[in-house]
Image (spheres, helix red, strand yellow):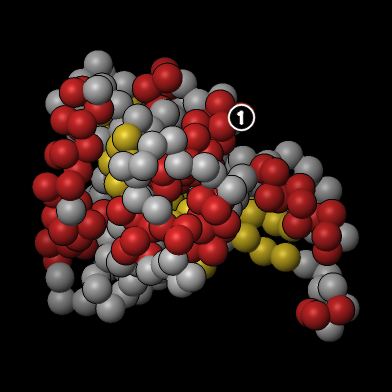
Amino acid sequence: MRNFGGRIRLVLVTGAPIAPSILRFTRAVFSCPVLEGYGCTETCGPVSASVAGDLNGSHVGAPWPHAEIKLTDVPDMGLVAARDNRGEICVRSTSCISGYYKNPEMTAKLKDKDGWLHTGDEGCLKVVDRCKNIFKLAQGEYIAPEKLELVYQQSALISQIFVDGDAHSTFPVALVVPEVEPLFKALSNHSPKSPHETIVIAQNKPSLEDICADPRAKKLVMADLKSLSEAANFMGFEKVKNIKLIAEPFSIDNSMLTPTQKVARPAVRKRYAEELINLYQEHIAV
């Protein structure tokens, strides 16, 4: 608290869902209300937020007075809002933009004839993920990658993670940018099982490339991901079955992050297309 001046009275969380455990921890540390809000650029600010005193997590509260909110069906995902209590979140409010500047085609996709703004988010005011991010596995199950990434990101061994899957596979895979020091320390405490394994610990200052190439590093990260997925009660089809450690962090400069610091999924998928295919084949071969 002293590092922040000792005057924090309110913490607002926006941009992405926050894990309930982190929410509880933040409230305990700062001893003040920690509220979750929901909105987007096109709504010009929040349209809903939790209230002080509500200690439940995993939701973004009730709509604000100026906003109407509804769920609509998402046929591509087999979601019927009235049946599933899930769908695309739509907002109608005086705060919403009238459209995109000189782009009637995009405006028509954004707002319907009744003035509802289609956010592209899927949820029930418990935002699950972007509709366009969710993918379907071969067995018909849908995966919300950001939900998985938020859990896996809690690993001390991971700096960044990208979870992916497709309609031809029955499980998700992931690209992982590791945290160098924690993973190096874990490797130092891990005895090689055979002389054929890469001995990263013999180097005084191993590079990130060296660590990523060490098969023991992959095993350590996979073990950590398994523990986290079990603690979060992931379904079997939600658990990442194979990973590749990569040395280049996702950034705006390499187009792997958007200007709002979110993973640019199409760009990452295109850049690592071959590696992702290999991850599916490696697991099947095993």
For the point 20% across and 23% down, the residue is 284
Which one is in front, 70 or 156?
156
Residue 208 picture quarter = bottom left
Residue 84 percent across, percent down from the top left: 43, 21
| Above or below, 221 relative to 51 | above
Which element type, helix, strand or loop, lies under badge 1?
helix
Most distant residue in the front direction: 195
Is residue 138 at least partly visible in the picture?
Answer: yes
Q: Residue reaching furthest bottom?
A: 5
- Of residues 177 and 95, the one nearer the viewer is 177
- Please tell me whether residue 87 is drawn above or below residue 17 in the rendered image: above
According to the picture, the residue beneath numbered tag 1 turns out to be 231
The structure residue drawn at horizontal position 24% and vertical position 70%, both measured from the top left corner, is: 255
Q: Is residue 128 left or right of residue 166?
A: right
The quarter of the picture where the C terminus appears is top left
Q: What's the residue at 67%, 43% (across, down)?
A: 20
| Image quarter hosting the N terminus | bottom right
Residue 217 is left or right of residue 167, and the answer is right
Query: Which amino acid type is marked by label 1?
Result: Ala
Please name the residue shown 45% across and 42% down the image: 192
x and y, in percent, of residue 32 in the image: 84, 61
Q: Is residue 176 something one can see in this rendering?
A: no
- Residue 123 occupies quadrant: top left
Can you give x and y, in whole percent of width and height, for residue 128 in the image? 46, 40
Q: Residues within 10 Å of mark 1 (few under 14, many from 20)?
A: few
Q: Is residue 195 left or right of residue 50?
A: left
Q: So how many labels did they put on this image? A: 1
Residue 206, percent from left and from top: 42, 67
Q: Nearer the viewer, residue 250 or 53?
A: 250
